[in-house]
Amino acid sequence: MNLSDLHPARGSRKKVRRVGRGPGSGRGKTSGRGTKGQKSISGYSSKIGFEGGQMPLHRRLPKRGFTNIFREEYREVNLERIEKITKKEVKPKDLKTAGIIKKESEAVKVLGRGDISSSKTVHAHKFSRSALKKIEKAGGKAVLIKG
């Protein structure tokens, strides 16, 4: 098979209709936009969710629930992933370099899935009870980061 034999399936590639190319083309003058109205003018773009003046769906539907503005989000990290880091002291910076978290500034919570064999000092913003037990059982230390 030659590279010249490769081609798209018949009918899958279609030429773009060029508008505004004179009266003979059938799409000249107003270029298929009609004569008057909001959408006929150049530069027209409608806002997202605009329904022609009708009350938009996102305003018609009832709002429910409650959003806690003081909610704190934590990036969860399991012990099995911390185990793979060879350092004795594991900080959020080390988790970032290992690709476990995206930003060093993220709040980290250590969860207890998996086991930890070597004694490590783990720095995090929160620890689950099972993670604390497993770290201390292995002879390590869990250090809380303030803030």
Image (tube, rainbow, N blue to C red):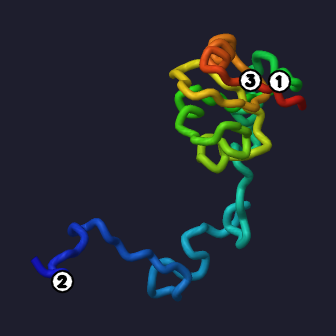
Identify whether 108 is placed above or below 98: above
Kindly identify the amino acid type of the residue bearing the numbered disc 1: Arg
Q: The residue tagged with tag 1: helix, strand or loop?
A: loop
Identify whether 45 is placed above or below 126: below
Q: Which residue is mark 1?
A: 71
C-alpha distance separating marks 1 and 3: 24 Å
| Front-lying residue, 110 or 74 | 110
Choose top left, top right, bottom left or bottom right for residue 45. Answer: bottom right
Please state which of the two labelled residues, at mark 1 or mark 3, is closer to the viewer: 3
Q: Residue at x 89, y 29 (%)?
A: 146
Please state which of the two labelled residues, at mark 3 or mark 2, is closer to the viewer: 3
Q: Position of residue 74 (x, y in %)?
A: 73, 29
Q: Which residue is mark 2?
A: 4
Identify whether 18 is placed above or below 108: below
Q: Which residue is mark 3?
A: 142
Q: Position of residue 95 (x, y in %)?
A: 66, 42
Left or right, 6 with reference to 101: left
Q: The residue tagged with tag 2: helix, strand or loop?
A: helix
Q: Quadrant of the N terminus?
A: bottom left
